[in-house]
Image (cartoon, rainbow, N blue to C red):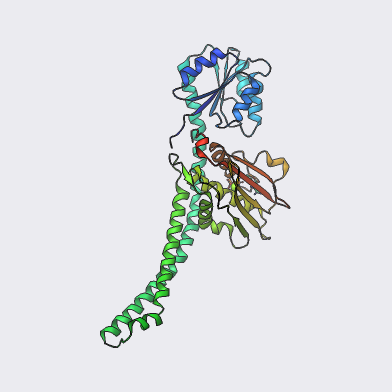
Amino acid sequence: MTLEKPTILIVDDEIQNIRVLSEFLKNEFRIIAATNGEGSLFRANAIPQPDAILLDIMMPDMDGYEVCRRLKADKATTNIPIIFMSAMVQLTDEIKGLELGAVDYITKPYSLPIVRSRLQTHVRLKQARFDAIRAARFAAAGQLAAGIAHEINTPLQYIASNIIYIQNEVSELINAIKEGKLIDLQAACAESELQEAIIDLRRGVSRISDIVLATKDFCSQNDAEMQYVDINNLINNVLLIGVRLIGNNHHLDVCLDSDLPPISCHPGRMSEVIMSLIQNAVQAVLPERNGDIRILTKRHGDWAEIHVMDNGAGIPPEIRDHIFDPFFTTRDVGFGQGLGLAIVYDTITKLGGTISVKDGPAEGSVFTIRLPVDGSQTETPNP
Ligand SMILES: Nc1ncnc2c1ncn2[C@@H]1O[C@H](COP(=O)(O)OP(=O)(O)OP(=O)(O)O)[C@@H](O)[C@H]1O
Ligand SMILES: [Mg+2]
């Protein structure tokens, strides 16, 4: 699957301005446009979300400042870089725009090549920020490596001891044959439990191979490799390598809808999403009580749903609007970077999906991811 061009939203009440900009920028960017404030808020929230917004200030009804204020106040759009474009050349206008959270201010009449290169810079910066966040997150995967090593070590140990057993048994049989003591080879083999040892050996090798495959998927962060993924299988793989994370104190209930169709996504990123939600669920449960963590998948019309539920502390209403913000955390220093849900949000919205949270039926929280089942319906903005 090829990567889409970055999407730019041009907001200007003069259609002619939109035409000129679109014509000049269309080779590098996918252009969407709005001619008023309301329309721009709608388009900024639509999928695919713009990677940057060129925003005129002087517009009837709602001016560009107000649009900027609203976009910055909304967690779904707050991270989109906004570049004001205006004929208002007072320094105070420019300062006002930047104070509202815009990243840049271009005065009219503008040079089209300059608009293009500033757009490219801001789109790249936005991406670089997320890449840096992701890299930091990925570094934390070192902890995961310890878990994987542990998971592999257990089957390896019984493989090693079975090999020693098989070796001893076989050399005894060979000696018996050499010395002419062996009369019934089949009976001797049956008695020696050699078959069981070999079956056990194969079971251990197959478990290691499952873990290695699951790890490979988990570590594939390559943006170019978007593919149709069996989400149920992916969840099982995440659980295979993340089982230590959940520990023995909690009860895990997994209920996967066998009719769930494959979903177009990056397996590595989707694994990271599931792992982050499980990690949060585990952290939400007080250490002194046993946690109930439930993972469900189900098809709902044109959507595949993934639910991750816990019976933990729940999310207080006053922080609910911030939990998807990058670096928002309520954990003690050193115990959380506040990046898990920001990355989950980024990954899911880029796939044309949604993530929401509500209180659990009795306590705790329920996180729900919805993804379009037909990947061809969604567009893939730049990663
Ligand atoms: N299942 C949950 N129950 C209760 N609170 C939650 C849950 N999931 C997330 N939160 C709240 O949302 C905040 C942000 O979560 P997020 O995963 O983004 O960051 P973090 O867990 O604090 O750190 P990181 O994931 O980077 O280690 C958490 O600090 C916590 O307050
Ligand atoms: Mg987290």
Determine if residue 335 is in view. Answer: no
The reply, left or right, for residue 202 in relation to residue 73 is left
The reply, left or right, for residue 64 in relation to residue 239 is right
Picture layout, residue 374 above or below residue 155: above
Residue at horizontal 47%, vertical 55%?
Answer: 145
Residue 132 percent location from the top left of the image? 50, 39
Picture layout, residue 345 above or below residue 59: below
Residue at horizontal 66%, vertical 27%?
Answer: 70
Residue 307 percent location from the top left of the image? 62, 49
Residue 41 percent location from the top left of the image? 63, 26
- Residue that protrudes farthest toward the bottom in the picture: 181
Tell me which corner region of the image, top left, top right, bottom left or bottom right, holds residue 104.
top right
Determine if residue 232 is in view. Answer: yes
Task: Name the quadrant of the N terminus.
Answer: top left
The reply, left or right, for residue 311 in relation to residue 262 is right
Picture layout, residue 300 above or below residue 172: above
Tell me which corner region of the image, top left, top right, bottom left or bottom right, holds residue 86.
top right
Picture layout, residue 23 above or below residue 380: above
Residue 289 percent location from the top left of the image? 68, 60
Count the marks: how many?
Answer: 0
